[in-house]
Image (cartoon, grey):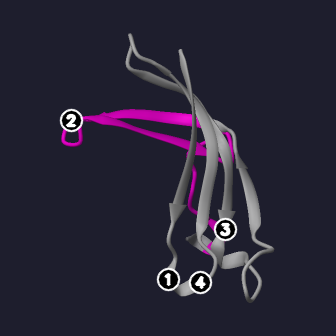
Amino acid sequence: MIPYDVVLTFHEPDTQPNDTIFTGSFAYDDVARAVSNLHGFLTESMTGGVGGGDMTELALDYQLSSVYDAALGGLLVTTFLNNNTNTLATDWGG
């Protein structure tokens, strides 16, 4: 297993100077070509105060999906806040 640290910034033009940023880590098995234990923190740019800062930060601790993408030649690995893949609210019939 090879450990990696990762920082991914999603530039959010409508919430500047705030961007959504994922800071985390994972392990890669180069023999099995598998990612495990992807986890980290995600800031929410839409929750930040005027002028930047004060963004809500969520702990994403549940790696629930790892799918090989033949078109890109790599893995799409996702980690979630909750221990399920329900990402959309069902309140009010939605």
Which label is found at residue 44?
3
Q: Are marks 4 and 3 in contact (CB under 8 Å)?
A: no
Secondary structure of the residue carrying tag 3 is strand
Q: Is residue 83 above or below residue 88?
A: above
Q: CA distance from mark 3 to mark 1?
A: 13 Å
Nearer to us of marks 3 and 1 is 1
Relative to 14, say whether 32 is above or below: above
**Residue behind mark 1:** 13
At label 1, the amino acid type is Pro
Compare marks 4 and 3 and give the one earlier in the sequence.
4
Pointer 1 local density, CA inside 10 Å: few below 14, some 14–19, many at least 20: few
Q: Mark 4: give few (<14), some (14-19) or many (20+) Cα within 10 Å.
A: some
Asked whether, in this view, residue 13 is left or right of residue 51, the answer is left
Residue interval drawn in magenta = 63-92
Say whether residue 69 is magenta.
Answer: yes
Find the distance from the CA under tag 4 to the CA under tag 2. 35 Å
Q: Is residue 60 left or right of residue 3?
A: right
Residues under numbered marks 1 and 4 in contact, where contact means CB atoms less than 8 Å apart: yes
Percent across and percent down for residue 65 are 48, 35
When the figure is inspected, residue 18 is found, relative to residue 6, above or below; the finding is below
Mark number displayed over residue 16: 4
**Residue corresponding to mark 2:** 70
Furthest residue toward left = 71
